[in-house]
Amino acid sequence: MSSPDLLPLDTPAASAALVALRDVHLTFGTTPVLRGIDLDVHRGQAVSIIGPSGSGKSTLLRCISGLLRPQRGSVTVDGIRVDQLTTEADTIALRKRIGFVFQQYNLFPHLSVLDNLTAAPVRVLGRTKQEAEADAHALLKKVGLADKAHAYPGQLSGGQQQRVAIARALAMRPELILFDEVTSALDPETVGEVLNVIGELVDDGLTCVLVTHEMAFARAISDAVVFTEHGVVVERGPAEQVFSSPVSARTRAFLSRALSGHTGTRPPAYAPWHAAFASAAFAV
């Protein structure tokens, strides 16, 4: 992914990763939110960022996408220095490559599902309406909503709207997709349908960074897990290692509380992640 309009990364070691954050600091007013974050995400990886509320997880995603700019440190995406972009055109060029699925669905309520999916590819990427609609129908089939193309967001459940939001992000054919607590606003009965879609994307090899409170899901689908607290990375490593034998006492305490809700009852078995949810290996 290269563009003469964007600034190249000048550090070869960092360019090996699709996403690389180095010593990232960001403060809102007098409140430090990120305090020296380092993070690597390699192409094809699924990386989950976990941690208590207010630990800077969502802020990290916004720095990666260029929605926020750190006061110190570097943010790169496939060799592009995101923190050094200077024009709106450069920022838009970057965001064409990054899909972002938010907590709230942010669908256009006055547009049909099909129009929600085709608006950006036609207006931003210059695709023909026919091409965009063909892609949209294929994506709706992928997320299990082939029959909802002509429905409006208000006619869909929360889980269906979030799946449309995922399909809309995919319609831009991103190389990287960011998920920010995409199940937190959903009814528990609809969480599984969204998790299944994300799991299939991971299986397809799409590079994903997820901020999530769904611990069993993170354990099942992630190549790596990053635990943050108070704006710093406390622990990182392969998912199974972090969940089964975390090094930090703080990570152990967090996971113990986060997974305690699974004691006695388990979420429904959402294929293909049933093995993770049914596993007895939740103890930390």
Image: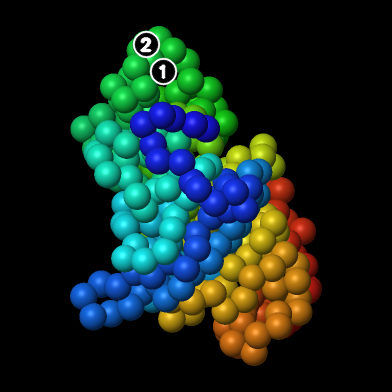
In the rendered image, which residue does mark 1 sit on?
A: 132
Q: Is residue 70 above or below residue 91?
A: below
Tell whether 195 sits left or right of 149: right
Q: Residue 134's spot in the image, x, y percent? A: 47, 15
Instruction: Check whether the beta carbons of the residues at disc 1 and disc 2 lie within 8 A of each other.
Output: yes
Instruction: Examine the rendering and report whether any part of residue 97 can be seen.
Output: yes
Q: Residue 152's spot in the image, x, y percent? A: 30, 33
Task: State the SS at label 2.
Answer: loop
Q: Amino acid at mark 1?
A: Ala
Q: Residue 137's spot in the image, x, y percent? A: 48, 21
The colour scheme is: rainbow
Tell whether 221 sits left or right of 170: right
Tell whether 284 sits left or right of 24: right
Q: Residue 216's spot in the image, x, y percent? A: 65, 66
**Of 197 and 158, the residue lying toward us:** 197
**For the view shown, which residue lies furthest in the front direction?**
10
**Where residue 73 is drawn, which disc sits there?**
none
Q: Residue at x 76, y 79 (%)?
A: 245
Q: Is residue 247 above or below residue 240?
A: below
At label 1, counting other C-alpha atoms closer than 10 Å, the crowd grade (few under 14, some 14-19, many 20 or more) is many
**Of 241 and 184, the residue lying toward us:** 241
In the rendered image, which residue does mark 2 sit on?
A: 128
Q: Residue at x 59, y 57 (%)?
A: 40
Q: Amino acid at mark 2?
A: Thr
Q: Residue at x 21, y 75 (%)?
A: 29
- Distance Cα–Cα, label 1 vs label 2: 6 Å
